[in-house]
Image: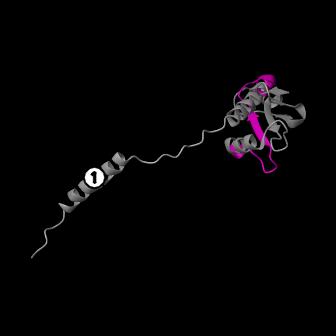
């Protein structure tokens, strides 16, 4: 079970862990012990998350989101399976916490009359500079 915040807790049936041998340094330990963790979270089927949160989570997850609506997170930073397991769970929790924050709605504003005038004056000024670069017309 993973506790995201006071209201949201992920159940064990939503999570699936598998272990494999990690790459990188570690000597013979790398060849013997399966310390890397692959955590799979069935996000699309999760009753704990609303549809809006799932949509934001899909965007945040990016390539980690599979076609069947699961998020796959791998962790192989540590030489210990337990530490990698905790790391993968924390990565998932952070991802979900980020998805819980709804973006602020943009309030449309209109440009002021003074800003419109400044823009038009700048355009006229720029046009006169460019007009001064032209060859003079012959009569």
Instruction: Indicate the position of residue 125 as horizontal and vertical percent values.
Output: 24, 54
Residue 9 in view, yes or no: yes
Q: Camera-side residue: 131 or 115?
A: 115
Residue farthest to the left, as pictured: 139
**Which quadrant would residue 133 be assigned to in this image?**
bottom left
Residue 65: say if magenta. yes
**Closer to the camera in the image, 118 or 38:** 118
How busy is the neighbourhood of tag 1: few (under 14 within 10 Å), some, or many (20 plus)? few
Question: Against 88, is 126 above or below?
Answer: below
Q: Quadrant of residue 62?
A: top right
Place of residue 95 in the rendered image (x, y in percent of width and height, measured from the top left) = 70, 34
- Residue at (79% x, 51% y) in the render: 67
Which quadrant holds the C terminus?
bottom left
Q: Residue furthest right?
A: 13
Magenta stretch in the rendered image: 62-85
Q: Dot 1 lies on which element? A: helix
* Residue sitting at x 77%, y 41%: 71
* For residue 92, side relative to residue 108 (left or right): right
Viewport quadrant of the N terminus: top right
The furthest residue to the front:
113
Give the colour scheme shown. Answer: one colour
Q: Position of residue 83 (x, y in %)?
A: 77, 23
Question: From where the camera sits, is residue 28 visible?
Answer: no
Magenta-span inclusion, residue 56 = no
Give the residue number, with chain letter if any, for mark 1: 121
Above/below status of 132 relative to 25: below
Is residue 128 left or right of 117 when viewed as pictured?
Answer: left
């Amino acid at each position: 079970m993973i506790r995201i915040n006071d209201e949201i807790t992920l159940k064990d049936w939503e999570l699936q862990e598998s272990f494999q041998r990690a790459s990188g340094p570690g000597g013979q330990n790398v060849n013997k012990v399966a310390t890397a963790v692959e955590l799979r979270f069935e996000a699309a089927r999760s009753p704990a998350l609303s549809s809006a949160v799932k949509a934001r989570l899909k965007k945040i997850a990016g390539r980690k989101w599979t076609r069947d609506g699961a998020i796959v997170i791998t962790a192989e930073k540590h030489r210990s399976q337990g530490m990698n397991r905790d790391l993968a769970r924390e990565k998932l929790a952070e991802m979900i916490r980020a998805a819980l924050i709804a973006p602020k709605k943009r309030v449309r504003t209109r440009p002021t009359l003074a800003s419109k005038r400044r823009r038009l004056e700048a355009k006229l000024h720029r046009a006169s500079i460019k007009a001064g670069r032209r060859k003079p017309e012959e009569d």
